[in-house]
Amino acid sequence: LNVNDKKAISMNYTSGVAVDYLPVYDMLEEVSNKYNICSIRADAAYDIRSVYKECRKYNIVPIIRPRKDTKICLADYLSERNKYISRIRSYENYEDGINEWKKKVKYGARSYIEVFFYRLKQIFGFGLKNKSEINREKELLIKCYLLNKFTDIGMAKFKLSA
């Protein structure tokens, strides 16, 4: 999701048992050729070395919430992550550290993706209509496209009369 215009720029349909971070590699490759991506924001499910390595490959700043029990690693591509961990641990407790970190890196922008999915489900329903996996992927792609068009149009404006 592009946080500036709130539109989906990439989508990857997976089976219900896929690990969250797996589509990231293909999606970053796809969007890095079309858009000037400065950073990505993701939850702790994406806090794995290969995601940071992929971000480094495309010169993207990873703003990924570190896991609570995570360790500092010396690999060069984890330098941003190590700074985050050090900053979080500089506070008396984890909750204070993580809350201050979220403010500092503007992690709250990640909520736009949650809002996008909320809108998607409110408009089109929670389930998919198609039975085949190929058609389900196409259905989801069409729904994302339509939601982007709805975003272009904007919210309805009503004139209040006295």
Image (cartoon, helix red, strand yellow):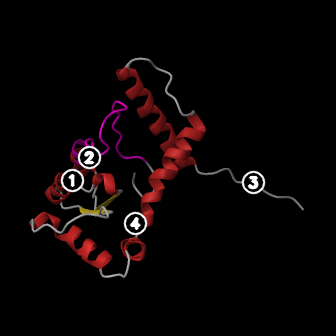
Per the image, label 4 sits on a secondary structure element best described as helix
Disc 3 packing (10 Å; few <14; some 14–19; many ≥20): few
Determine the residue positioned at 48% across, 44% down: 148
For the residues bearing labels 3 and 1, Cβ distance under 8 angstroms:
no
For the residues bearing labels 3 and 4, Cβ distance under 8 angstroms:
no
Residue that mark 3 sits on: 158
Residue that mark 2 sits on: 24
For the residues bearing labels 1 and 2, Cβ distance under 8 angstroms:
yes
Determine the residue positioned at 36% across, 72% down: 105
Q: Is residue 131 above or below residue 140?
A: above
Residue 6 visible in the current orientation: no
Q: Is residue 14 magenta?
A: yes
Residue 51: mark in rendering: 1
State the CA–CA distance, disc 1 to disc 2: 7 Å
Residue 107: mark in rendering: 4
Residue that lies at the very extreme toward the left in this rendered image: 75
Disc 2 packing (10 Å; few <14; some 14–19; many ≥20): some
Q: Is residue 133 left or right of residue 124?
A: left
Which is more N-terminal, label 3 or label 2?
2
Q: Nearer the viewer, residue 32 or 91?
A: 91
Per the image, label 3 sits on a secondary structure element best described as loop
